[in-house]
Amino acid sequence: MVGVLLQVNGLLRAHELCNAVSSEGTFEGGFRTDFGPAKPHIELQEVNFTGTPHVTDDGFFFIPDEASKYVGEPSDEMDEAWEALIGDRGILLSHQEAIEAWGPQHEQFWNQGSGGYYADFEMLHMLHCVNQIRKLFAPERYPMELTNRLRVHRDHCLNSLREHIMCKGDLTPLPTKWTPGIQHNYIEANRPHICRNFQKLRDFATNRKKGVLAVQPDFEQKKGLLPGR
């Protein structure tokens, strides 16, 4: 009898966990906090990461060509590659979409300058942050005065990346392997990961920005709600 009760309890607990998971969503189907209209465009794919440094026999480190499109010595081609990733990233949400995304406080997010509820997808915001940090390492090409605003922006980007990594909790095991050029093991990060298809989501974001799915700005509708109006 005790065994039966334990089994029943286990089944009930499993049912509760399934309901908890389904209420928050899934990586494949979209989480509760994901933008609703984007969820049908989520597609999973296996991606083999690249970028693990190679080491020559005399200890010289270098990034292989297949991973150097976005890193290395800055160039016009590299800037174009980053622009292809993060350009045209801001979109407007409809009134109903804003309510669904942000709840009762959605009105405070009206952007009069954009004529609507302006939003940036987190994945593109994170890529923007990575690109900004990349530029800080090349002041000769991207001269910037380290003002208070830029310093805070840098710290914001670093903290956002920290939070995002901790939030996703990627548990892919990364091995190390013997590397003769340095006479000890070195991490091998070129491992397969299950990812959302970035290009499909990027195409959706572009379509929402300037395609048939774009929400048109309205520079008159919310003027009365702005502070001081």
Image (cartoon, helix red, strand yellow):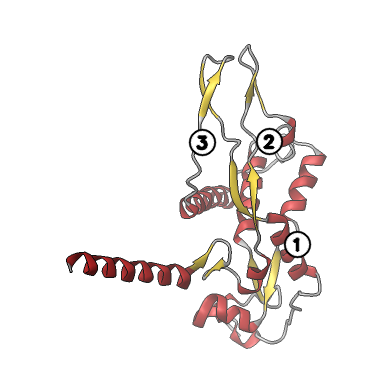
Q: Quadrant of the N terminus?
A: bottom left
Name the residue beneath numbered marker 1. Answer: 203
**What x and y, as percent, mark residue 54?**
64, 24
Left or right: 6 as drawn, with respect to 95: left
**What x and y, as percent, mark residue 26?**
52, 64
Q: Residue at x 33, y 68 (%)?
A: 11
**What x and y, as percent, mark residue 159?**
49, 50
Name the residue beneath numbered marker 3. Answer: 174
Disc 2 to disc 1, C-alpha distance? 30 Å
Q: Pointer 2 and pointer 1: residues touching (CB < 8 Å)?
A: no
Q: Is residue 89 above or below residue 181?
A: below
Q: Amino acid at mark 2?
A: Ala
Q: Secondary structure at mark 1?
A: helix
Q: Pointer 1 and pointer 3: residues touching (CB < 8 Å)?
A: no
Q: Name the mark on residue 178.
A: none
Q: Quadrant of the C terminus?
A: bottom right
Q: Residue at x 72, y 65 (%)?
A: 205
Indicate which label's residue lies in the foreground, 1 or 3.
3
Disc 1 to disc 3, C-alpha distance? 31 Å
Q: Amino acid at mark 3?
A: Leu
Name the residue beneath numbered marker 2. Answer: 138
Closer to us: 168 or 127 = 168
